Image (cartoon, grey):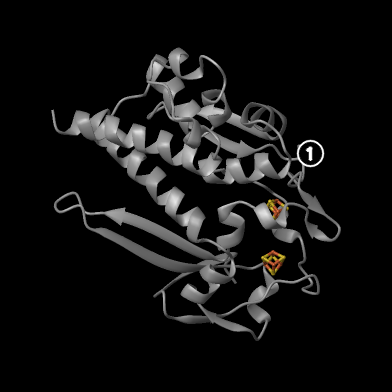
Amino acid sequence: MESEKIIELSVEEPFCFGCHNHVPCFNECCRDLNQFLTPYDIIRLKNHFKLSSSEFLKQYTTQHIGPQTGLPVITITPADRFERVCPFVSASGCSVYENRPSSCRMYPVIRVLSRSREDGKQEIRYALLREKHCRGFEQKSQLTVREWMAGQGLASYNEANDLMMDIISLKNQTMPGPLKGHLQKLFYTMCYDIDRLKAPGGAAELEISEIPEAVKNDDEKLLRYGMNYLKKYFMALQSK
Ligand code: SF4
Ligand code: SF4
């Protein structure tokens, strides 16, 4: 049997799956980690630990710059080098469950967003990732993809992640080479290290106008503010 299979399905299509602490593979998927974090994942996790974004990024993540795009990529640093176990897994399951990243919530569903270059129309496609080690598919509970996403509390994650995809796609269209210098720092701060925007002089350091206090006092608003700033920046380049 292949170790994994991808099966396309529609948002209203049901699939059998269940994950709980009685499945024989409990916690299996929290090792051999290659876990990317989105900007929204980071605000949820850093607030879970009551850390600033800078402290969270330093303590729990590994960062690199995509060589073709110059965009920062953030992954969770595994707790050990060999089994690459997630630092948040415990014997009783995920210790950050209420703030776990979007990819952990979505699994075993894959959601792919694309936008037509001609008319900008958005298309979202779904698939199931059936991996050999995952015994959740042997469970009897049945949900549609839509019900699965609602049960996993994915609405706010998907909204922010879709905005991020828009920004990346606009950046790649308008600046196909690697992002560098000031723009790279702006991108990193606005998407990942948002608490730096709250610090006195944070906006001035990035050469942007002062951010309204009401935005600074709400991480979700602050993230949306920063990401929309980047979106508008790349859209302005597009219209030149
Ligand atoms: S964040 Fe939680 S669910 Fe996701 S890999 Fe880590 S322990 Fe597992
Ligand atoms: S059923 Fe799948 S998702 Fe759940 S613990 Fe097992 S491997 Fe992970």
Quick one: 31 or 200, which is closer to the camera?
Answer: 200
Report the residue at 54% width, 40% height from top: 218
Q: Residue 197, how many percent across, how many down?
A: 51, 25
Q: Residue 158, how many percent across, how many down?
A: 46, 56
User: As drawn, is 116 to the left or to the right of 114?
Assistant: left
Judging by the rendered image, the residue that carries numbered circle 1 is 80
Tell me the quarter of the image containing the N terminus: bottom right
**Measured along the vertical axis of the image, is residue 151 above or below residue 118?**
below
Q: In which quadrant of the rendered view does residue 171 lie? A: top left
Given the current orientation, which residue lies at the most extreme right position?
91
Tell me the quarter of the image containing the C terminus: top left
User: As drawn, is 22 to the left or to the right of 6?
Assistant: right
Question: Badge 1: few (under 14), some or many (20 or more) residues near its Cα, within 10 Å?
Answer: few
Can residue 125 be seen in the rendering of this structure?
yes
Quick one: 1 or 220, which is closer to the camera?
Answer: 220
**Measured along the vertical axis of the image, is residue 177 above or below residue 4?**
above
**Measured along the vertical axis of the image, is residue 114 above or below residue 35?**
below
Q: Name the amino acid type tagged 1.
A: Asp
User: As drawn, is 109 to the left or to the right of 31?
Assistant: left
Q: Residue 192, how many percent across, how many down?
A: 53, 33
Assign a secondary structure to mark 1.
loop
Report the residue at 56% width, 54% height from top: 102
Q: Residue 30, how many percent across, how many down?
A: 71, 54
Q: In which quadrant of the rendered view does residue 141 lie? A: bottom right
Report the residue at 47% width, 73% height from top: 146
Can residue 35 be seen in the rendering of this structure?
no
Report the residue at 73% width, 44% height from top: 84
